[in-house]
Amino acid sequence: MTGSTRYRLDLAYDGAAFHGWASQDGLRTVQGELEHWLTTVLRLESPAQLTVAGRTDAGVHARGQVAHVDLPDDDLPSDAYADRLTRRLARVLPADLTVRSVTVAPPGFDARFSAIWRRYVYRLAETTGDPLHRGLVHRVGRPLDVEAMDAAAAALVGLHDFVAFCKAKPFATTIRRVLDCGVTRVDAGELAGTVAVEIRADAFCHSMVRSVVGALVGVGLGQHDAAWLERHVSAAQRARDIKVMPARGLVLEEVGYPADDQLAARAAQARTRRDEQPLPLQPAIEEQP
């Protein structure tokens, strides 16, 4: 029987023209596009099947997404096969999807379950902003109290049930551990003057980040105070007074993994339901995945 090798793919995409990550019949998705081209360029007998670190919603962008795929062994050594696949994908993928690298995954690696955190950034413009950034920045159109937003964000840090901020799914927990959450004004570069909401957590539930940003924008506009946000962190049901922000301002920037010898153990641990056994706080890994 032919063996297989697991490969890690580091990729980025402009989510504007995609209906999210996950494959959907009749719709263009990141997973569908990438699996199609993997299957085509490798002439696989069975379609390639990807596992991803974080399933982004329609319109959400990614700069540091990670996925893995198990591929049949080839006559080439695995490292050379990975290099060849990187080059082939670069020739065929559309302009809004890039696979930066394909590498042989270390033993025990699972793009989804081995991850110990994901980091998202949502970018806001208070004024009309630069039209060249319209696909990456959401325009609020009014001044924001960045200090009040940043202070209120502290209530989100820690292990909480984020049901007030999530679209519930049957048999799925909404308990998450937020490691960092802060709001800053960008003071340099092309996006200088915009406001960045950055949040890093062990995982996220559906619409959680955009709802968190919506709540913080409410604080920044003076519509709510920090105590209002803190009450929602301990709420028992979905909040009706939190706006879910548009997808275009959100970017998955980075995914963190533990050391190679901890990958398998982390994957086994992450499969445990959080409401049955809360995940312990893991040390942050700051290097680019």
Image (tube, grey):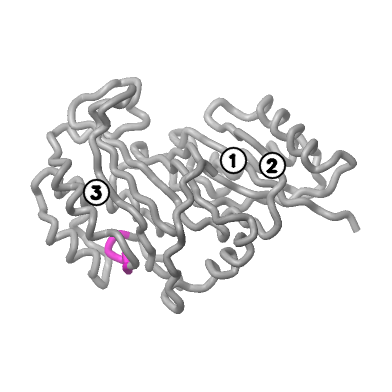
Residue located at (19% from left, 45% from top): 217
| Chain-order first, disc 3 or disc 2 | 2
Disc 1 on helix, strand or loop? strand
The x and y percentages for residue 131 are 30, 21
Q: Is residue 33 magenta?
A: no
Instruction: Point out the stretch of residues depicted in magenta.
Output: 160-165
User: In the rendered view of the protein, which quadrant contains the C terminus?
Assistant: top right
Q: Nearer the viewer, mark 3 or mark 2?
A: 2
Eyeballing the image, is 112 above or below 142?
A: below
- Give the residue number, with chain letter if any, for mark 1: 10
Q: Do the numbered discs 3 and 2 sit on residues whose CB atoms are within 8 Å?
A: no
Q: Do the numbered discs 2 and 1 sit on residues whose CB atoms are within 8 Å?
A: yes
Residue located at (27% from left, 59% from top): 156
- Give the residue number, with chain letter if any, for mark 2: 103
Q: Is residue 164 magenta?
A: yes
- Give the residue number, with chain letter if any, for mark 3: 214
Mark 3–mark 2 Cα distance, whole angstroms, equals: 37 Å
> How crowded is the residue under tag 2: few (<14 C-alpha within 10 Å), some, or many (20+)?
some
> How crowded is the residue under tag 3: few (<14 C-alpha within 10 Å), some, or many (20+)?
some
Eyeballing the image, is 106 above or below 232?
A: above
> How crowded is the residue under tag 1: few (<14 C-alpha within 10 Å), some, or many (20+)?
many
The x and y percentages for residue 25 are 58, 48
The x and y percentages for residue 219 are 14, 49
